[in-house]
Image (cartoon, rainbow, N blue to C red):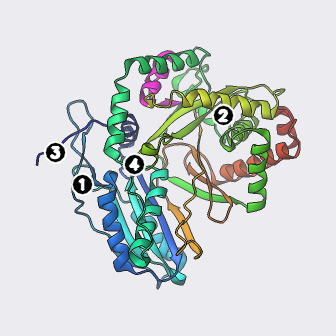
Amino acid sequence: MDRKLYPLSSAERLMYDMVTGFPRWPQILNISALLTLQAPIDFDILRQALELEYARNESLRLRFTEPAKDGLPRQYIVEKETASPQFLDLSGKSEEEAVAVLQRDAAEPFARVDSPMHAFTMVKMPDGYNGIYVKMDHMITDSSAIILMINDVMEVYCHLAFGTPLPHAPTSYLASLKRDLQREKDQKRLEADRAFWEHTLDLGEPIYTDIAGSRRLREAQMETHNPRLRAAFQETEKIDVGQYSYYLEPEPAARLQEFCRGQGISMDSLLMMAIRTYLSKVNGGMTDITVRHYLSRRASALNRFCGGVRIHMYPCRTVLGAQTGFLEGSRAIQQMQARIYRHADFDPLLLRKMMAKRFHHGENMTYEGVALTYQPLPLRLKNERISGLPYKVRWLTNGSEAQPLYLTVMHTTDFCLEFYCRYQKNTCSAKDVELFYYYLMRILFAVVEKPGRTIGDVISVV
């Protein structure tokens, strides 16, 4: 078959690196979500809507080849999707049993070569809830893209079922990819980005911290016979996932948002500051804290609606003493993030190699025990024909986690803040995660009550 092949973007290379880095966990890139409405659904029309989405959304028709000589696959887009939506009736089961069925499927990997990397299933769930279960591979999507895609599917469904206007089609994934690949060849931009990170690394070597204290760092020091080692080993074998969602109710969630507006800081920065304060607390008052931060590069209209994966991740390091004001620290993080955003197209894998070379350790080592994604875009149904119906959104795990703790903070449909914790059960315990959330809330609201508190004050009162 004659097909136009394209190299992987830096975001896709980042994801593919996870496939090769965790060979015992082929499902590690699976992302799954379930949207159900408590209402009858015409599944014939929903099938038409899903099939139309295949045609509208180029990223759903992505395929990948066998790895080439450089070890990386190439990608191409097929003209017509051959996969078809499936149907599953789980209405006779309990909620727990029905979710367990989907959860098992969410851990099944995709074929990676010349094969669809998505699966749409129309589902009937208990208690009259009906909708769609989506399983996709991170090579072709991220959480923001899934949210926008599901909203598009439901808008198309309403168009077909009720005659409401057909929404604008998603933008071209291929156009976005070509722009990314062209930017990667821009030597002037590349050198400016590299210079920024070289200057950042000039500040010295970070040190590893996580929510379970200094145990993993001490283990790495003992294993390498190097008591001055500041990095921990990346766990690649025992990465069974634990997960839990904590919900901050609408009133306190609104208080946090109002506090951020009043202080002129982003929710992202406030959350990052609270995380680093807790890490300082459980790591003996450590002042040097690094948190892994995920960025969804969707600032332009083209990139926002094109699908695909646009995630990059970078270390956000701050060195803040106990006498530093908490809000002062939050603003320092915000300024750091603003500088990183200006260089957000830099290849994260290249940065990892730069750090390994600079600080003389293997690439399979890390300074980051906690990762954060702040997802301000909730999966809210917009069409007036269905927006008033009761509905549920659930994210399902693939059974593995690449990081000790990955926290995603999301706005929910009922105006809560969801703190979705995924953690390596071999690295952190459920109790560690419970304490992390408990103290995170105490830290946040200690500052809401008295904004002038220092980091030391906050740690002492919580």
Between marks 2 and 3, how big is the CA–CA gap? 52 Å
Dot 3 alpha-carbon crowd within 10 angstroms: few under 14, some 14 to 19, many 20 or more: few
In depth, the one of 208 and 185 nearer the eye is 185
Quarter of the rendering containing residue 23: top left
Going from N to C along the chain, the mark reached first, 2 or 1, is 1
Residue under numbered circle 4: 306
Going from N to C along the chain, the mark reached first, 3 or 1, is 3
Going from N to C along the chain, the mark reached first, 3 or 4, is 3
Q: Secondary structure at mark 4?
A: loop
Q: Residue furthest left?
A: 1
Between marks 2 and 4, how big is the CA–CA gap? 42 Å
| Type of the residue with mark 3 | Arg
Going from N to C along the chain, the mark reached first, 4 or 1, is 1
Tell me the mark number nearer the camera, choosing from 2 and 1. 1
Q: Secondary structure at mark 1?
A: loop
Quarter of the rendering containing residue 206: top right
Tell me residue 212's x, y (percent): 66, 41
In the rendered image, the vertical position of residue 194 relative to residue 324, given as above or below: above
Magenta range is 349-366
Residue under numbered circle 3: 3
Residue 361 belongs to magenta span: yes
Going from N to C along the chain, the mark reached first, 2 or 4, is 2
| Type of the residue with mark 2 | Ser
Residue under numbered circle 2: 214
Tell me the mark number nearer the camera, choosing from 4 and 1. 4
Tell me residue 336's x, y (percent): 64, 28
Instruction: Classify residue 138 as left or right of residue 54.
Output: right
In depth, the one of 299 and 287 nearer the eye is 299
Q: Which mark, residue 202?
A: none
Q: Secondary structure at mark 2?
A: loop
Q: Is residue 341 visible?
A: yes
Between marks 4 and 1, how big is the CA–CA gap? 20 Å
